[in-house]
Image: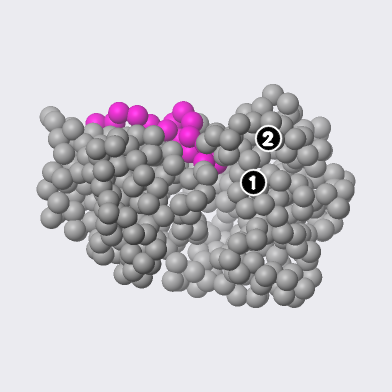
Amino acid sequence: MKILAVIQCIAEDVHSSNPDNYCISPLKKADFIDNIVLAVPKLGNFSIFNRLSKKWKVDVFYGSNYNVAERVYNASKKYSPDLVIRVLLRRFYIDLDLVKTMISKIKEGYDYVNLDNNVYNEVAADVSTFKALKLAVKLLKKLPNNYLSNTFRFNPWRFMECSNKFKITTLEYNKKWSKTRINKTQQKIRKLFENEEDSTQPVDQNEPVNRYRFISKFIKKNDVILDIACGKGGGSEILSHFAKKVYGIDYNPNYISYAKSKFHKPNLKFLHGTDLLLEGFKSKFDKVISAHTMEHVNDDNLFLQRIRNCLKSNGKLILEVPRLTPYPLGKPLWPHHKREYTKKSLEHVLKKAGFAIEQAFGANRRNYVNVKNARDSFLYICKPNKN
């Protein structure tokens, strides 16, 4: 079978020109991959890939930004591959043994191989037939322009899971990395990204699918909202379209300066500080949003108590945290994460801090589903417990 590796990337992913710091080197060493192409949207300093693709001796294709399905498909067409594996540029730690196992399942006659939710997808790739990818693009064009459809265009592999037009299988994988491999990977991540706090990009307020757009469904027009660890303010800006007032707080002064310079709205205010600032906001907020923050704090119970104390009696906490998967690591890959959560451990800390759970969702490729089917993270909506 002819196998093409499509590397999805943007200019902000680039921190050096060394191919060993990306998935470039391991993919080029893999004896089962025939061609490699970078699939890049025309955003920001995208032209850097003209030089890098030559240095790395791989091809480059420029295509759609938010419609990843079309970008990956159009990047693949000229190679006429049988299989397409899609991976993100920064995954220098890609587990090629796992990818080979996925490919072997495809050869049994499937269109797409889905990973069991207990497998950490960050170390793998999306493996599908080229025919399935082509069909997905065709079907996605017929869908309306709404949040769910846009999540599918951003993640056509999730669409394959949800559609009855594809023959898929779910791979259960219970192999574990050695402690040595985990430690070496984390050390390299620390070295490469010592000035970054997460592997994810800042929230793009123009993006049609992100967690803040889902969260906005739970916001009322008279709400006063706190967005804790707001980063560069993109998520806070989205919320400001639905709320009366939004406060964004972040400990990074550069992020706050950027947010203040970019967003100028009378109902949007940015403050420099940590959750310690919350002690000065007694019973002020209708909603507190904490999106991928609690995994970074030293004391998650204290963090939640501070949020509880600054909520109105009928206020709500909307909390999203990463899910801990047992394989192949069984611990957070990203070294800045103090912890990640199972459903049981998250519910325990919420109840201990005095919250009652109202709703629970699981994130699966930006598609929010039943909490029992969580793949990437948990999103809980809670209220202060009056007891």
Residue drawn at x 84%, y 57% as measured from the top left = 34
Give whichever of 140, 335 is nearer the camera: 140
Disc 1: CA contacts within 10 A as few (<14), some (14-19) or many (>=20): many
Magenta stretch: includes residue 203 = no
Q: Which mark is residue 233?
A: none
Callout 2 amino acid:
Leu
Foreground: 234 or 242?
A: 242
Determine the image quadrant of residue 42.
bottom right
Q: Where in the figure is residue 43, as x and y percent of width and height?
A: 60, 62
- In the image, what residue occupies the spot 36% across and 63% down? 259
User: Circle 2 — which element?
Assistant: helix
Q: In what quadrant of the picture does the C terminus appear? A: top left
Measured in 3D between alpha carbons, the distance from the residue under mark 2 to the one under mark 1, in whole angstroms, is: 10 Å
Residue 194 location, quadrant: bottom left
Tag 2 and tag 1, C-beta contact below 8 Å: yes
What residue did someone put label 1 on?
A: 67
Q: Is residue 197 above or below residue 294?
A: below
Residue at the spot of label 2: 140
